[in-house]
Image (tube, rainbow, N blue to C red):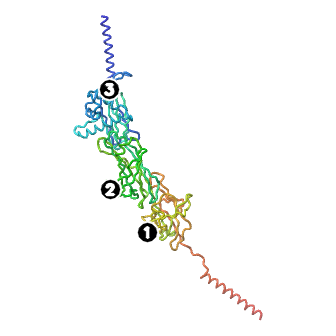
Amino acid sequence: MKRIKKFAAALLTAIMMMTMTVTAFAAESNGTLTVNVKGGQTLANQTVNVYKLFDMTVSGSGESLNYGYKVNETYKSILDKVLGAEVTDKSDQGYYEAVQKATSDGKNGNNTQKFANDFTKELLNYNKSNTSAKIEATVTETFDKASTETSTTFDGLAYGYYLVCQTGTKAIQSSLVALTEPTATVNLKSEAPKIEKKADKATIFVGETVTYTVTGQVPDTTGYDNYIYKIHDTLTSGLDFVTNTEGTKVKVTVKIGDTTVDVNEADFVNATGEVVTTPTRTMVLDLSGKVRAATTGQTIVVTYQAKVNKDAVVETKNSATLEYSNNPGTNETGTTKPSEVVTPTYPLDINKINAKDKKMLAGTHFTLYGSTSEGTIDRTKAIKVTKDGEGKYTYASDQNATENTTTDMVTVADKIDGKGNLHINGLAAGTYYLEETKAPDGFNKLANPIKITIAKSEDTDVNNWTISKDGNEETDKIIDIENSTGSLLPSTGGAGVIVFAGVAILLVFGVVVSFIRDKRKAC
């Protein structure tokens, strides 16, 4: 009896231990997965998809922790394509071992990422070819364009091995995660490629050439059969691309990493996006093949030039965008926000008026001078202009030219474009001296040159530039200059002669009267 009791007790203990083990195994079968996007980004207009590739069981604890895997039948055909010859055993264990081998870190340590991207590509291709029988994500969440969310959480997910990918306007960069504990986190690496454009000049004269530099990085093209990487650039009417000798393409220089690549021309594009051989103000530079052959993360530097023409205005700018692939297995592309550089050129509007009645004065002649490094007038720098019309002039692109240029500018009687009666376009920010060389008939010429200072905007709004006259800012950006009529100077003829003649007669008369009076006394 004692033996039976001992056996029963031992059996009960064993059952209890087994029960505890099973309970411990089953108690933690679900967890929460948090998905974060890369810093500085949001989930706006994005969809986060989560696919469970393997069911997972967890047993034991500590160093004795064990995992069991069961492949999800839904994804076997996708796994077969991605793993290829690596799958020799179609059992759960066989798929597990094949995935483990494919994701083991090798050269560059990116095998896991490659598997994730390859799986995503094949999955997207499958769904594209089987529209009526698409493979749906285990869980998914879509965010609208106004969303500011930077993370999302999926609760109640069964333990397993998951693929997480983000689709939408950004480039896809999938991630893999093993959910084996109550909580797990995925930090998505997805990030849209970006470019930054700069100019070598902050402000410019008409006729100057500006060098633009566009900088980007070679994106991760893993999982893409074809990756599109095109730089688009559009100029305003005040800029013209510098072209090749034939004038059929835009001259460019491209450097990837430390190597200058054999791309030296970009195509002109017309309003409908067609490549043309006649100059337009839109170009496209296709670097798709070059980035696919380059190393991820290498710096891309593209340089090209544009010349400022006489139509330039304050908002003379260059706007570049990047078109890039954002959906593996398709030809779909996204486009970055425009990266703009403003290289302003400024107008000078003069309002020449009568000091008495404030009416405009025509026929006043002016010459504009540059300044010395000390800020004084430099009479060796009389600025040459071309005449565009009565009272309208533009800074001459060739300051050494002797033909079709002048330094003499003349005011007109009426406003030009609703402003002053003398307009000069195409000046860079800086200090100038305006000298009146001839006044209108009946008016006095200004004794001294007027100091004019044009200052670039201190903020990002290019239109917040300022212009000053002798140190005082003109809020309407028009330089008012007054002329006065001359006063009558003293003279020595006319009435003065008459006055003096009268005085003389009176003196003579006085002498005669005195003579007669003396004569009578003598008698």
Circles 1 and 2: CB distance less than 8 Å? no
User: Which residue corresponds to mark 3?
Assistant: 29
Circles 2 and 3: CB distance less than 8 Å? no
Mark 3: secondary structure: loop
In the image, is residue 362 above or below residue 219? Answer: below
Of residue 151 and residue 222, the one placed in the foreground of this image is: 222
User: Which residue corresponds to mark 1?
Assistant: 390
Mark 2: secondary structure: strand
In the image, is residue 97 above or below residue 193? Answer: above
Please state which amino acid type lies under the numbered disc 2.
Val
Q: Distance from label 3 to label 1 (Cα)?
A: 86 Å
N-terminal of the two: label 3 or label 1?
3
Please tell me which residue is depicted at 37% across the width and 56% down the height of the picture.
Answer: 281
User: Which residue corresponds to mark 2?
Assistant: 276
- Asked if residue 5 can be seen in this view, the reply is yes
Mark in front: 3 vs 1: 1
Please state which amino acid type lies under the numbered disc 3.
Ser
Q: Distance from label 2 to label 3 (Cα)?
A: 62 Å
